[in-house]
């Protein structure tokens, strides 16, 4: 999550993206998103450029002109304008600027998915993919291995997902291999799920049950959580027989654990005293 300084630096680019997304078509927004993420990749590979573009000793106009000179004729004019607005902000450091560029690309991808009516699908596909990865130690190890080239890990994701998920889902899953916002692969996926939900003005509730919930049970739980938090809630349900019974719900930093496994653990602890 951005601190106040970086949030202010991000604001102008974010506002400009919202203005662009309101009038552009889905394909145009998606193209700009991919171009921004490509530039974020360039910033990741080129620390000297990253430092130059985040240097507070350089006037904002000079930093904007530098990114314009680098990108002119290589990407869409809208992409150049958005990134010029981004680097014009006062960032706390080069790493924060990289995080901002990645976030801008993600927000653009989510805007394209929203305009195309695919945002809920992208959110669910990212979550399902995270479950698949978590349930396969070999796959999780391969995708989380920071010593392996990002290109190789992205090729693995492409082989697994291409043609099976929305294009935005594939792009976001690949972004996670580079460590979105400085996070590990698994945590990056979780954050991307939450950003997709936030784009739909929803919080994410991670629900663990011993057996699958019925549609009616999911609806009742979602309604109860929406009442509790004052906004709609997107349920992400994981079935885990190890909890024996009951339900565990995590929303942000809040954890509600009503599982049989927890009660048995508490009883065992009490008896041991």
Image (spheres, rainbow, N blue to C red):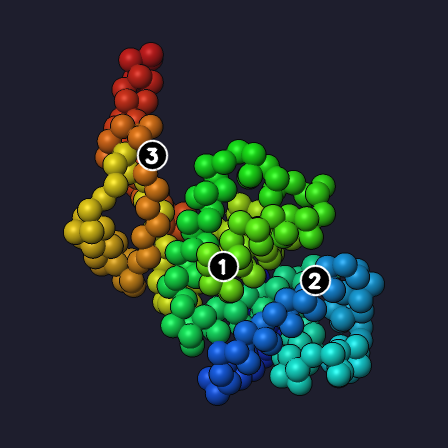
Pointers 3 and 2 in contact (C-beta within 8 Å)? no
Q: CA distance from mark 2 to mark 1?
A: 24 Å
Q: Which residue is mark 1?
A: 163
Q: Which residue is mark 2?
A: 41
Q: Is residue 52 left or right of residue 208?
A: right
Asked which secondary structure carries label 1, the reply is loop
Asked which secondary structure carries label 2, the reply is helix
In the image, residue 13 sits, relative to residue 163, either above or below, namely: below
Asked which secondary structure carries label 3, the reply is loop
Residue placed furthest toward the right: 48
Q: CA distance from mark 3 to mark 2?
A: 37 Å
Residue at the (52%, 78%) spot, across then down: 27
Q: Measured from the top left, where is residue 23 in percent x and y?
A: 48, 87
Location of the C terminus by quadrant is top left
Question: Taking the image as drawn, is residue 262 in sight?
Answer: no
Callout 3 environment at 10 Å: few (<14), some (14 to 19), or many (20+)? few
Q: Which residue is mark 3?
A: 240
Which numbered disc flags the more N-terminal residue, 2 or 1? 2
């Amino acid at each position: 999550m951005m601190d106040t300084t970086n949030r202010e630096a991000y604001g102008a680019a974010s506002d400009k993206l919202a203005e662009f997304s309101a009038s552009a078509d889905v394909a145009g927004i998606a193209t700009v998103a991919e171009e921004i993420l490509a530039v974020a990749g360039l910033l990741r590979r080129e620390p000297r450029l990253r430092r130059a573009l985040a240097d507070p000793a350089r006037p904002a106009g000079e930093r904007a002109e530098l990114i314009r000179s680098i990108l002119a004729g290589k990407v869409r004019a809208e992409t150049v304008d958005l990134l010029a607005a981004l680097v014009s902000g006062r960032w706390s450091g080069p790493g924060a600027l990289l995080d901002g560029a990645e976030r801008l690309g993600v927000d653009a991808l989510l805007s394209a998915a929203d305009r195309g009516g695919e945002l809920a699908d992208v959110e669910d596909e990212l979550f399902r993919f995270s479950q698949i990865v978590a349930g396969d130690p070999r796959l999780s190890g391969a995708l989380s291995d920071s010593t392996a080239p990002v290109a190789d890990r992205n090729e693995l994701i492409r082989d697994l997902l291409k043609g099976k998920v929305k294009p935005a889902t594939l792009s976001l899953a690949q972004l996670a291999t580079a460590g979105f916002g400085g996070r590990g692969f698994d945590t990056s996926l979780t954050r991307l799920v939450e950003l997709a939900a936030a784009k739909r003005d929803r919080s994410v509730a991670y629900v663990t049950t011993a057996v699958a919930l019925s549609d009616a049970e999911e609806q009742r739980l979602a309604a109860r959580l929406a009442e509790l938090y004052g906004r709609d809630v997107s349920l992400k349900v994981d079935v885990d027989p190890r909890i024996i019974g009951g339900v565990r719900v995590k929303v942000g930093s809040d954890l509600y654990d009503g599982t049989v496994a927890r009660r048995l653990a508490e009883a065992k602890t009490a008896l041991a005293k």
